Structures are given as structure tokens and as C-alpha cells.
């Protein structure tokens, strides 16, 4: 089950640069970037989904052909055999209906996880851009500080003792 969250966006000025700060709370609408641990949890939950349920898939593969092939009904000769077949058909119907429902829910979850991955990727790209911009800004500041240090050292060396 995917947790819904709400986000609060605030614009903050850091060293003369405007940045968007996103605060996520446990209840939100879609389109918000998920937390990494939430994304990991959702991905791990997909490992236990219907499509990887080997036991049920094996049961389905072992269903006798008479429960799914109408043409084999012509071979029924008495009511007792027909009733036994009806029981097997009902059991197969229940098994397949339940499995199809689980597969449908899995598809919904996979769509949600796909959206989470999309939102997470976009947010990470935005954070990367902000980090790159901040790095460039601080590289420039470092160069300026190194220049000032060089000037101070030069000035100190030129002062009389």
C-alpha cells in the first residue's frame, strides 16, 4: 500500500539565491516526490505481488483442460460426472477470479510505484541542479577568499617588521 503524503513548498533565499524548499508530511496527493525509504518500501512490497506467486500460478497451470474448454462438455455422459465437473469449474473460477483481482491490484500498485519513481527522479534532478548551482557559487566564493588571502599575505609580507 502506497502512503499518501502532503507537501509544503516554501521559497527561501540562501546567500542571495532563491531556493524552493519542500517539506513532506505523511499525507499527500500524487505528484509529490516520495521519501527514499517510502520508495524502497513500495519496491520491496512488489516482490510479494501476485505475478511472483509461484504456488498459485502452478495451481492454475495444472487445471485440467475440461474446466476451460467448452468443447470437452460433449464428453459428459451422466449427471454425477457433470456435477463433479461443475465443482471443479467453480473452484477454478474462484482461483482465477481471486488471482486476476490480485493481478489487477498489483498493476495499480505498479502504476503508483512508477509515478513515485517518476516524481522521485524529477525531485532528485531538481536537487542535483540546486546542488550544482550551489557548488559553483561556493567555488566562486572560494576563489575570492583565496584571492583575499593572497592579498593579505602579500600585504603582510610588505609591512615593515
Image: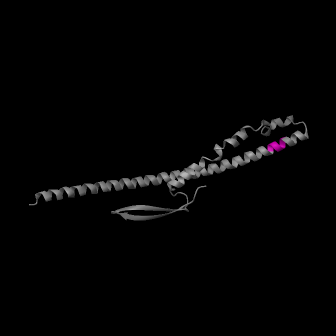
Q: Which residue appears at 37% of the width and 64% of the height?
A: 13
Which is the main secondary structure of the residues drawn in magenta?
Answer: helix
Which residue is at 74% across, 46% downward?
Answer: 95
Residue appearing at x 32%, y 53% in the figure: 136
The image quadrant of residue 4 is bottom right
Looking at the image, the residue that sits furthest to the left is 160
Q: In the figure, is residue 152 to the left or right of 134?
A: left
Location of the N terminus by quadrant is bottom right
* Coloration of the structure image: one colour
Closest to the observer, 137 or 42: 42
- Up the image or down, 138 lies above or below 69; here it is below
- Residue 58 at x, y = what percent? 70, 39
Report the front residue among 87 and 29. 87
Asked whether residue 86 is drawn in magenta, I would say: yes
Quadrant of the frame with the C terminus: bottom left
- Give x and y (percent) for residue 60: 72, 40
Query: What count of labels does the image hold?
Result: 0
Residue range (magenta): 85-89
Q: Could you say which quadrant of the image residue 20 lies in?
A: bottom left
Residue extending farthest right: 78
Q: Position of residue 142 (x, y in %)?
A: 27, 55
- Residue 44 seen: yes
Is residue 147 a member of the stretch shown in magenta? no
Compared across the picture, whether 28 is left or right of 59 comes to: left
Q: Nearer the viewer, residue 148 or 9?
A: 148
Amino acid at each position: 500500500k502506497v502512503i499518501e503524503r502532503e507537501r509544503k513548498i516554501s521559497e527561501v533565499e540562501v546567500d542571495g539565491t532563491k531556493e524552493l524548499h519542500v517539506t513532506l508530511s505523511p499525507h499527500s496527493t500524487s505528484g509529490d516526490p516520495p521519501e527514499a525509504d517510502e520508495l524502497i518500501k513500495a519496491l520491496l512490497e512488489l516482490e510479494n505481488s501476485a505475478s511472483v506467486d509461484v504456488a498459485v500460478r502452478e495451481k492454475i497451470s495444472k487445471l485440467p483442460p475440461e474446466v476451460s474448454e467448452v468443447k470437452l462438455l460433449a464428453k459428459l455422459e451422466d449427471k454425477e460426472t457433470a456435477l463433479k465437473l461443475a465443482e471443479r469449474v467453480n473452484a477454478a473460477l474462484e482461483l482465477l477470479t481471486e488471482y486476476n483481482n490480485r493481478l489487477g491490484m498489483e498493476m495499480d500498485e505498479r502504476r503508483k510505484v512508477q509515478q513515485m519513481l517518476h516524481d522521485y527522479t524529477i525531485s532528485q534532478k531538481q536537487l542535483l541542479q540546486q546542488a550544482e548551482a550551489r557548488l559553483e557559487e561556493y567555488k566562486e566564493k572560494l576563489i575570492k577568499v583565496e584571492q583575499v588571502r593572497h592579498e593579505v599575505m602579500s600585504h603582510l609580507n610588505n609591512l615593515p617588521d
